[in-house]
Image (spheres, rainbow, N blue to C red):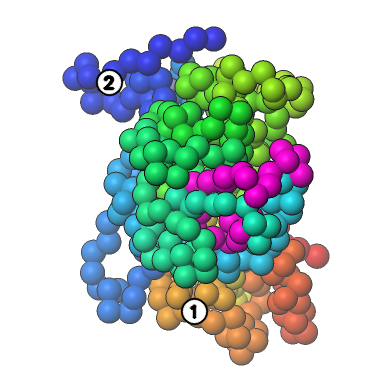
Amino acid sequence: MAVTIKTADSGDSRAACRFCGARLEHTFVDLGMSPLCQTHIEPHQLNSMERFYPLLVRVCRECFLVQLEQYVAPDEIFCDYAYFSSYSDSWVEHARRYVEAVTRRFGLGNKSLVMEIASNDGYLLQHFVARGISCRGIEPAANVAKVAVERGIPTTVRFLGRDAAHDLACEFGKPDLLLGNNVLAHVPDINDFVGGMKRLLGGTGVITMEFPHLQRLMAENQFDTIYHEHFSYLSLGTVERIFAHHGLRLFDVEELSTHGGSLRIYACHADDASKADTGEVQRVKAGERAFGLDSLRGYDGFERRVRDTKNKLLRFLIEAREAGKTVVGYGAPGKGNTLLNYCGIRTDYLDYTVDRSPHKQGRYTPGTHIPILAPERIRETRPDYVLILPWNLQQEITRSMSYIREWGGRFVVPIPAVRVLP
Ligand SMILES: [Zn+2]
């Protein structure tokens, strides 16, 4: 289906779809007001005002792009970003396996050029460097890019768009592989971004991108993955439409377990006949149609399920409190911030939470002001329940914290519905 791009300038105050320009009037879910998820509060800030922004998610009636309006400039969010990918062992291993597979599949060698968008601290490109393949990282957060450069990963500090693509192609050449993981959802101007990839990619080059799959978000109630840094929530059907508009064709897709269920897409120039379609794109799109993602009605009902999840979690916490039980949190991830703010969970329900990252310890969760302590605190206070906020890491966490069973402690996960683990 062809999509006409309209300019949003009719004097109407409602936002326009960031892809096709249609007026956004259909609500997907309204999670109320929330502060930015990376702004952990320091003790001296506890008595200061905090800025809250709406978490109102819309779905476009024309192209079904599920999206959050942009309230905060991306450079405010990403320029001094606190997330270093190398801190997660499982993510570094995921990257290593990807590099091995893609090098083999597309015959990359010492004459190839690989570029990564949002290359973070070089956790992925380091595996190409080790194979003698030329690399260039493109990373907007200067503090994170600096770490990559110190590790020997050539990195340009920049947001990707059409202008940046032109400059990069002139200076470094056009890549044989252009990749970006967990970046497509984070770009406010998705047309300038995908248009930039089109301009940058070499003639027979391949684009791969990973992003959380909207269908999994909906099927598994992962509403806490909605936060201000994530502007778009993507189905394969909508991504294919956006890429096609910019002259790019999807020829393969893989379903991954990362981030609660992600897609990895493979794209090339629309006129590049050297890439055969694997049939997987059609298969995943058929699943999305069966799920209802190609009609507005398919998006209704999500908000009701989100409220049910909130009610069940609050009921559990209230009953635990009334029974004189102690409940603490594990983790202070971005998704925890949405969950805690949306459900109104403060120290009345959670005494404290713990996090392995020393950058977060001694601070407080944004908006809800729950103290973030070192994990050892759990052994000292022996709580009855530990609520796992980064539920996607629950296996890792229950294994490393299994000692809570010594005093009869139990783990609880909030998503897809509150559940006390056996
Ligand atoms: Zn649209």
> Alpha-carbon neighbours of circle 2 within 10 Å: few (<14), some, or many (≥20)?
some
On the question of residue 341 being in view, the answer is no
- In the image, taking residue 307 as reference, residue 276 lies left or right, namely right
The image quadrant of residue 175 is top right
Query: Quick one: 261 or 163, which is closer to the camera?
Result: 163
Give yes or no for residue 110 being in the magenta stretch. Answer: yes
Which residue does the image show at 43% across and 81% down from the upper left?
362
Which element is circle 1 on? Answer: loop
Direction bottom: furthest residue: 380
Secondary element at tag 2: loop
Image region (quadrant) for ligand 1 = top left
Residue 57 placement (x, y as % from top left) = 43, 36
Q: Residues within 10 Å of mark 1 (few under 14, many from 20)?
A: few
Q: CA distance from mark 1 to mark 2?
A: 44 Å
Question: Is 321 colored magenta in this rendering?
Answer: no
Q: Quadrant of the N terminus?
A: top right
Q: Residue at x 68, y 57 (%)?
A: 131
Relative to residue 112, is residue 126 depicted above or below? Answer: below
Q: Residue furthest right?
A: 422
Q: Earlier in the sequence, mark 1 or mark 2?
A: 2
Which residue has dot 1 on it? Answer: 358
Which residue is the site of mark 2?
A: 8
Q: Amino acid at mark 2?
A: Ala
The picture places residue 107, in percent across and down from the top left corner, at 73, 41
Which residue type carries mark 1?
A: Pro
Q: Look at the image and tell me whether residue 40 can be seen.
A: yes
Q: Observer-nearest residue: 162 or 294?
A: 162
Q: Residue at x 30, y 74 (%)?
A: 46
Horizontally, residue 42 falls left or right of residue 376, namely left
**Coordinates of residue 99 in the picture (x, y in percent):** 69, 51
Residues in magenta? 104-129
